[in-house]
Amino acid sequence: METYRAEIPNNFLLPRRLKRLGELAYNLWWTWNPNAQRLFIEIDRDLWERTNHNPIRFLNQVQRAQLNAVTQNHYYLDNFDRIFNQFDDYMNTQDTWCARNHPEYNHRPIAYFSTEFGLHETLPIYAGGLGILSGDHLKGASDLGIPLIAVGFLYTHGYFSQRISEDGWQEAHYLRLNFSDLPILPITTIDGEPMTVSVDLPGREVKARLWAIHVGRVKLYLLDSDVDGNSVSDRELTARLYTSDLESRISQEIILGIGGVRALRSLGYNPSVWHLNEGHSAFLNLERIREMIASGHTFEEAKKHIYASCIFTTHTPVPAGNDEFPEWLIDKYFSNLIPELELDREQFFSLGRNPNPWGSTFSMPVLAIRMARFRNGVSELHGQVAREMWRHLWPELHVEDVPITYITNGVHTGSWLARRLGSLFDEYLGENWMDLLDKSQTWDAIEKIPDAELWDVRRHLKRKLVHYVREKGRDQWLNGSIHPVQVIASGVLLDPYALTIGFARRFATYKRANLILRDLDRLLDIINRPNMPVQIIFAGKSHPADEPGKMLIQEVYRIVKKAENGGRLVFLEDYDMNLARYLLQGVDVWLNTPRRPHEASGTSGMKAAMNGVLNFSVLDGWWREGYNGRNGWAIGRDSEFDDPNQQDEEDALSLYEILENQIIPLYYKKRSSDGLPGDWIDMMKESIRTLSPQFSMRRMVKEYVEQLYVNALQNKVIEYDILD
Ligand SMILES: *Cc1c(COP(=O)(O)O)cnc(C)c1O
């Protein structure tokens, strides 16, 4: 029998015929089914935009007359019934890829832990790529019928929204989330009390309450320490993502790892596989060992057992990016736990010790590596980098034998593909292309799409982007939230017919947002040639504590703001999943210029590719695997440099050269027969055909299942692989 409740509130005042819209609002399935979104849009498009695509706010605010109107509209009602049939089929079918191929998983859940989940713009519990990957992983697992359950945080203040001051300085604005507007379900006991778990922090017990989110068939459980009984400062522990204060951070990670295991236990789960997305949740292994020791096992037995079922995915290619704590802090937070694990202090520290030249630290990735039999990076090159970085943990092995493998990231097609392109694919790729989207044969049919139809959709998507940006700029201007000198920089002069390049991502220095600005005179020459205009749109946030990142935004913004750019360089504020969709679907070229090999994978270029946008990137992360010489452009060489300055210089020269002599002429070269840029469209088709299957979440999740989860489920321990 159930021991808890998580009920969908039924408080919307809806006509009986439309009652089920309330249910749809509480399952994020609608976020990756554009036709389901139409059920809201067709009631009141303006309200849908004003509520930032939030169906719960929408249903709370919509006028009764508008609801009544659609109940008289047969077209709407037919569509309504069709969508709910699809939804019911999706939720209830027993015939999934997982059930057909891996029936051994029935009732054997896989626990997936991550500090952030990027599921939709209305749920700001993600900062960037890592979160989007976790969100897409849940959606992909749901589509395939994988019995995944996920654990993360409900950050009460979410990630910040970004404003740029007149002088280009990033301002971070935090708003307390209004939980009643979000698709989150409070979990209560049978008696209706909020369900909580608790963890020990120095001198006190801290409680966290539990929430659930339905992501299709997958459930995501979120922890939140803002509960009665906790001190004021403990209530703030889960308020924000990635605080730089070490004590808050270690407390967060104890809540996630140890509290997360306790949460799953109190909900009645006994996962057979545990997947750690990054090392932040690695304390969960200590809790699993503690549980086993409490039930009579030795430390060694417990470690062997948990090791065999644990998977650790690393995303961090630079040592400085790793999450680690000074040993005094570990003493402070774990002195009570150490004896419970039947270890002495030294044995405990050796579980996570990273012998840095500047002194030993307790490293979360080391703890994760030592406790996980399966370890992987997120692209082929990143796998190599990770083996190099951690080879000191296996001093007796050659670097190529270090047991860290890789699974290249992917993206969730339904979430990122423009609706109009989806319709075109429905027409030409066969009705069930979505179920076969990781097969390369499915995409051979791209050739059948007439160039004019594809180009029409591309033009539509660019107009949509330009319209959105101009309206946003106009609004900001009208409501006085920007200074007059910022108006042009906000994109009001964008041209819907000019070749448009997008650069949007987190502003960390290794991403080199300023590379294309390195020789500004040359760039301005290139983008202002007669009849061949080029415009560049920048967007991105920097972590609030990352001063060099914020200075990079300022450097880019100051250049963008200059009058002599004539509005051809633009910076858009507040990059999030919504703006990402507009950009990734609307621009012509997606630019990525990381300093190799610092981009573990990168995923935005994959989203761009499926939308017919051409990638123009450094051969790092995923692009090194995706680029085939005919499906986009590569900046620089397939190798690294010792001197970062020389690397920047060569990459910038390569960038200008290709932009000037290949990209711009190809875009503006029209066929005389029909006036379309035929060679460009050919390259676009090659890009969609080759990249969409290979970098799909469907391919990625299947690889996790078949290369890692299945082996972890078998629970066999390979002795040599254990690190002592
Ligand atoms: C996809 C995405 C990212 C990650 O993009 P990268 O290519 O890894 O930089 C970050 N933020 C948002 C909003 C995204 O949609």
Image (spheres, rainbow, N blue to C red):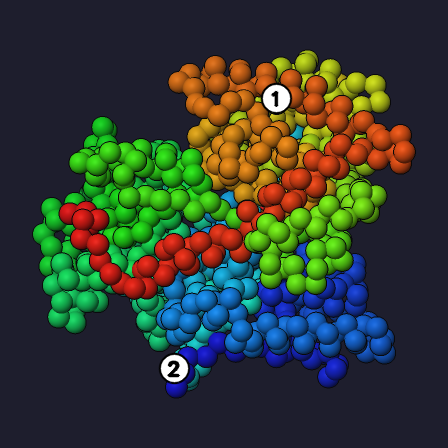
Q: Quadrant of ligand 1?
A: top right
Q: Secondary structure at mark 1?
A: helix
Give 462 or 566, whichever is nearer the viewer.
462
Q: Is residue 300 above or below residue 664?
A: below
Ranked by sequence position, the earlier of labels 1 and 2 is: 2
Residue 177 placed where, x, y %?
Answer: 55, 58
**Residue positioned 70% across, 63% down in the render:** 431
Residue 175 in sight: no
Residue 4 placed where, x, y %?
Answer: 41, 79
Which kind of residue does numbered mark 1 sit on? Leu
Mark-to-mark CA distance, 1 and 2? 60 Å
Which kind of residue does numbered mark 2 sit on? Thr
**Residue positioned 24% across, 34% down in the render:** 398
Residue at numbered disc 2 = 3
**Residue positioned 23% across, 29% down in the render:** 358
Residue 586 placed where, x, y %?
Answer: 72, 42
Residue at numbered disc 1 = 655
Is the residue under label 2 in contact with that under label 1 (CB below 8 Å)?
no
Disc 2 packing (10 Å; few <14; some 14–19; many ≥20): few
* Comparing labels 1 and 2, the label whose residue is closer to the camera: 1
Q: Is residue 596 above or below residue 335?
A: above
Figure label count: 2
- Quarter of the rendering containing residue 397: top left
